[in-house]
Image: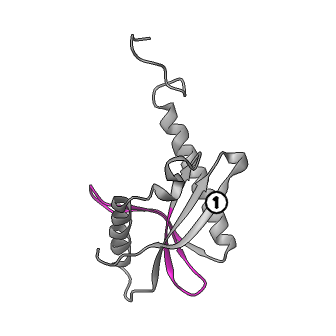
C-alpha cells in the first residue's frame, strides 16, 4: 500500500462505484415495478441525448390519463443531507428537461407531460420509496 492512502471500502479500485451503480440499478428496477403497479406503462428506459453535455432520463412512462411522465430515480442509503429527493439539483433538472425536449421532438403532437422523482432511501432490506408527482416543471427552460 502506498503511504498516505487508505484502501477503498470495496477492496479493489473502482469496486465502490460498481456497487453504487448496482444499488442505483436496483432502485430503478424497484421504482419501475412500483410505478407499473400504479398503472403507468413503460415507454423507454435510460434515454440519453446524443453528444456531450446532454441529459439522461431514467424512466419514461405513460400515465393512465395519457400524460407522458419523465421520472428521475434517486437512491441514497440515508436521509442525511436532505436525502435522495434533495439530490435532484437545478442542473440535473435542466438536463432532464433538455433530454425530454429531445425525446419529444419525434412526436407529431406534444402530449401532456410531467416530471416526477422517485426517491429510494435505505438499504435493500429496509427501503422507503417516495414518489413525488410534478416534482419540477419545465417553465422558463
Residue 42, x across and y down, in percent: 57, 71
Q: Mark 1 points at which residue?
A: 129
Quadrant of the rendered image containing residue 123:
top right
Which of 45 and 30 lies nearest the eye of the viewer? 30
The type of colouring in the image is one colour
Q: In this view, does 74 lie above or below 123?
A: below
Which of 10 and 129 lies nearest the eye of the viewer? 129
Q: Is residue 125 magenta?
A: no
| Residue at 44% across, 11% down | 1
For residue 81, side relative to residue 2 (left or right): right
Residue 12, x across and y down, in percent: 50, 24
Q: Quadrant of the C terminus?
A: bottom left
Q: In this view, does 16 lie above or below 88?
A: above
Q: Which residue lies furthest to the left in this view?
A: 52
Residue 109, x across and y down, in percent: 39, 89
Report the number of discs: 1
Q: Is the magenta stretch mostly helix, strand or loop?
A: strand
Q: Which residue lies furthest to the front in this view?
A: 81
Q: Counting other residues with Cα less than 10 Å from the Cα at mark 1, is it few (<14), some (14-19), or many (20 or more)?
A: some
Q: Is residue 35 above or below residue 85?
A: below
Residue 94, x across and y down, in percent: 33, 65
Q: Regarding mark 1 in the picture, which secondary structure is present there?
A: strand
Q: Is residue 61 above or below residue 73?
A: below
For residue 7, side relative to residue 109 (left or right): right
Quadrant of the rendered image containing residue 31:
bottom right
For residue 104, side relative to residue 9 (left or right): left
Magenta span of residues: 43-72
| Residue at 53% across, 52% down | 83
| Residue at 60% across, 75% down | 41
Amino acid at each position: 500500500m502506498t503511504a498516505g492512502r487508505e484502501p477503498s471500502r470495496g477492496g479493489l479500485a473502482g469496486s465502490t462505484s460498481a456497487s453504487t451503480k448496482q444499488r442505483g440499478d436496483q432502485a430503478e428496477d424497484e421504482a419501475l415495478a412500483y410505478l407499473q403497479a400504479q398503472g403507468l406503462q413503460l415507454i423507454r428506459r435510460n434515454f440519453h441525448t446524443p453528444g456531450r453535455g446532454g441529459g439522461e432520463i431514467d424512466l419514461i412512462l405513460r400515465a393512465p390519463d395519457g400524460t407522458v411522465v419523465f421520472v428521475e430515480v434517486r437512491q441514497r442509503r440515508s436521509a442525511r443531507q436532505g436525502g435522495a429527493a434533495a439530490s435532484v439539483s437545478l442542473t440535473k433538472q435542466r438536463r432532464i428537461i433538455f433530454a425530454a425536449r429531445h425525446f419529444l421532438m419525434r412526436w407529431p403532437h406534444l402530449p401532456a407531460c410531467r416530471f416526477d422523482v422517485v426517491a429510494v432511501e435505505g438499504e435493500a432490506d429496509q427501503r422507503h420509496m417516495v414518489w413525488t408527482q410534478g416534482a419540477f416543471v419545465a417553465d422558463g427552460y
